[in-house]
Each structure stands twice: as C-alpha cells, then as structure tokens.
C-alpha cells in the first residue's frame, strides 16, 4: 500500500477547490524537501456543477477578457476530456477580410493563431453561425491540426445581438468526446460570453 506523503487542496477557481493526496511508496521519507508538479487531477464535478461554476465566473468577471480567461480555465481543469480550450474572436479591419484571432486559451500553444473564415472547423462554425462537432478529426477535410493527439473537436459560435463575434473551440484527445450534454455546456459558456459583451460593449 503506497504511503500518503502529503494531503493538499488546490484552488482551481475562486469558488472551487479539490482535495488530493500524493502517495508514493518509493519516497524514502516524508515530503520535506520534495517539490511536486501536478500533471493531472481528477475531479468529481458534474456537468451541472461546472455549469454553476461558469455562471459564477460571469458574476465575478471584471471584463469580457477576464470572463473568457476564467471560462477556459474552469473547462480545462474540470472537464477531463477537454484538452485544449480557447476563444477565437473575429477581427474586422475595413480593408481586409474578417479573421478569427486566438484569444484566451488553456492547453498547448497552437500554430493557428489567426484563421480565415473559409478555413478549418473554426472557420466553418464562424461563417455558418452553427455549432460544429467533429467526432473524428481525421475524417473531416476541413480540420486544421493543432496537436497530433487531438481526436475530436467542438466549436461553438459566440453571438452579440445576433451577429457572430467569435467562438469557443475545444479539442479532445478522445474520439467522440463531445456528447449532447457537452454541447449544451459549451453553448451555455458561449452564450454567457455573448450576453456579457452585449451588456459591456467594448
Ligand atoms: N482545429 C481547428 C484549428 C484550431 S486548433 O484546434 C486550436 C480548426 O480546424 O479550425
């Protein structure tokens, strides 16, 4: 039986914390002097609890950017199959075609920091104004690879007064990770951001 060498609580978001234990039979003596890096953590939050946490973010946020940063952090930390979570927002310059620009995100850096609206799963969601769920990215010719580990993806548009202004993009290392309840949760998050932007225009 491994010996527990440390118990601790990790704050994930202002109103959310998780308890954990480090146990390892190979440590010669209790934790003093050891430094730990937490590589992964399981939580027992339900989809509904994550939804409540995100709603709390909308109350606590000090700006739209802050809200988006809080949402990507909560989704990335609490939803174990959400391995990359990020917002792209549409940038419009009068003399250029609109483009999706990477905003707040959690996960590995992506090569796709600017995406045209006629390219990728991201472009498809933004230009159609519809949620796009791809269960197997290898089978979708529109897919722009961000990580070799990505197996499935969901992209949900963010609307302000009926216009698409950006989107919430999530990649998973698991095939078909985004079920009906995931879609509802991600659409809820995107709606919160749209509502926040409507109330707090830049
Ligand atoms: N896969 C996306 C590109 C963005 S990265 O996944 C972060 C696409 O096909 O548009």
Image (spheres, rainbow, N blue to C red):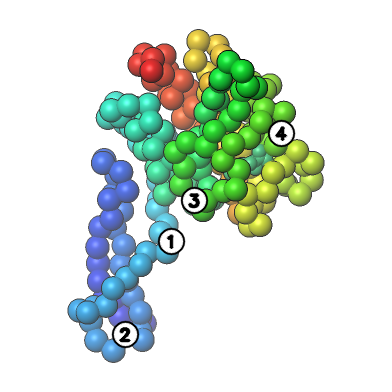
Which one is in front, 19 or 92? 92
Residue at 41% from the left image edge and 49% from the top image edge = 77
Q: Mark 4 points at which residue?
A: 119
Label 1: which secondary element: loop
Label 4: which secondary element: loop
Q: Is residue 149 above or below residue 120?
A: below
* Residue 171 percent across, percent down from the top left: 59, 45
Label 2: which secondary element: loop
Is the residue marked by circle 3 packed among few (<14), some (14-19), or many (20+) residues within 10 Å?
A: some
Residue at 61% from the left image edge and 18% from the top image edge = 95
Give the mark nearest the N terminus, 3 or 4: 3
Dot 2 beta carbon under 8 Å from ligand 1: no
Label 3: which secondary element: loop
Is the residue marked by circle 4 packed among few (<14), some (14-19), or many (20+) residues within 10 Å?
A: some
Give the Cα distance between marks 1 and 3.
12 Å
Give the mark nearest the N terminus, 3 or 2: 2
Dot 3 beta carbon under 8 Å from ligand 1: yes
Is residue 144 toward the left or the right of residue 72 in the image? Answer: right
* Residue 31 percent across, percent down from the top left: 24, 78
Q: Mark 3 points at which residue?
A: 107
Q: Mark 2 points at which residue?
A: 27
**Count of numbered labels shown in the rendering:** 4
Dot 4 beta carbon under 8 Å from ligand 1: yes
* Residue 101 percent across, percent down from the top left: 54, 33
Give the Cα distance between marks 3 and 2.
30 Å
């Amino acid at each position: 039986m491994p010996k527990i060498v440390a118990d601790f609580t990790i704050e994930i978001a202002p109103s959310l914390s998780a308890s954990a234990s480090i146990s390892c039979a190979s440590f010669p003596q209790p934790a003093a002097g050891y430094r730990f890096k937490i590589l992964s953590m399981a939580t027992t939050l339900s989809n509904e609890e994550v939804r409540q946490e995100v709603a709390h973010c909308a109350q606590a946020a000090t700006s739209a950017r802050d809200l988006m940063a809080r949402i990507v952090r909560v989704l990335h930390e609490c939803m174990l199959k959400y391995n990359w979570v990020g917002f792209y927002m549409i940038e419009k310059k009068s003399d250029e075609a609109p483009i999706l620009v990477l905003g707040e995100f959690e996960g590995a850096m992506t090569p796709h920091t600017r995406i045209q609206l006629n390219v990728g799963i991201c472009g498809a969601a933004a230009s159609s104004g519809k949620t796009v769920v791809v269960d197997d990215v290898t089978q979708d010719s529109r897919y722009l690879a961000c990580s070799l580990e990505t197996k499935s993806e969901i992209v949900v548009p963010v609307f302000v007064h009926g216009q698409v202004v950006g989107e919430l993009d999530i990649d998973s290392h698991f095939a078909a990770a985004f079920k009906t309840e995931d879609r509802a949760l991600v659409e809820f998050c995107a709606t919160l951001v749209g509502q926040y932007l409507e109330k707090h225009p830049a």
